[in-house]
Image (cartoon, rainbow, N blue to C red):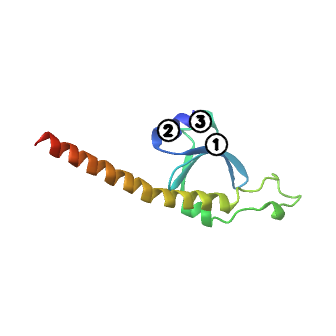
Amino acid sequence: SLLSIALRHGYWAVGVAVLNRAPRWVVVGLYSVRMFSSSEQAAASSMEFQLHDLCKHTVLRADELTEDLPMHVADTDNTAWCEFEAAGGRSMPLLYIAWALAALVLAVSIMQVFE
């Protein structure tokens, strides 16, 4: 399932997005997005994109849809990808602080063992 893929590979959001007028299952990480054409074929049909690239991707907006388009579906708006990118960027310093504190606690614990 997508949730198990997300948990196994460190992604932190699961949902549905539209890219090039095609709905896709997505799992979002700190810096990348993995898209699947369907949850049953997750391993075989996944595509990975950097959030930065999707943030700058030109989307087909709802106001640009016309009657001659075969599918009347607008792409997921860039702001969603840009917000995920910003959230990932804001969380990295917190992760670095957590790793530094964990290393400090480990160092103190090792020093106490050898006293």
Q: Quadrant of the C terminus?
A: top left
Q: Position of residue 32 (x, y in %)?
A: 52, 54
Question: Residue 41, labelled with which disc?
Answer: 3
Instruction: Answer yes or no: is residue 18 visible.
Output: yes
Name the residue type under label 3.
Gln
Query: Is 35 rendered above or below residue 96?
Result: above
Element at label 3: helix
Q: Residue furthest left?
A: 115
Choose the circle earlier in sequence order: 1 or 2.
Answer: 2
Q: Is residue 80 left or right of residue 88?
A: right
> Which residue is located at x 63 percent, y 64 percent?
57
Alpha carbon separation for disc pair 1 and 3: 7 Å
Q: Nearer the viewer, residue 90 or 34?
A: 90
Single out the mark in the foreground, 3 or 2. 2
Question: Residue 37, labelled with which disc?
Answer: 1
> Which residue is located at x 51 percent, y 45 percent?
11
Residue under label 2, please give it. Answer: 7
Element at label 1: loop
Q: Is residue 9 left or right of residue 58?
A: left
Residues at discs 3 and 2 in contact (Cβ within 8 Å): no
Q: Nearer the viewer, residue 115 or 32?
A: 115
Residues at discs 1 and 3 in contact (Cβ within 8 Å): yes
Alpha carbon separation for disc pair 1 and 2: 19 Å
Question: Residue 87, labelled with which disc?
Answer: none
Around disc 3, counting alpha carbons within 10 Å, would you say few (fewer than 14), some (14 to 19), or many (20 or more)?
A: few
Query: Is 112 rendered above or below residue 69?
Result: above
Q: Position of residue 94 (x, y in %)?
A: 44, 56
Name the residue type under label 1.
Ser
Quadrant of residue 75 in the image? bottom right
Q: Position of residue 92 (x, y in %)?
A: 45, 57
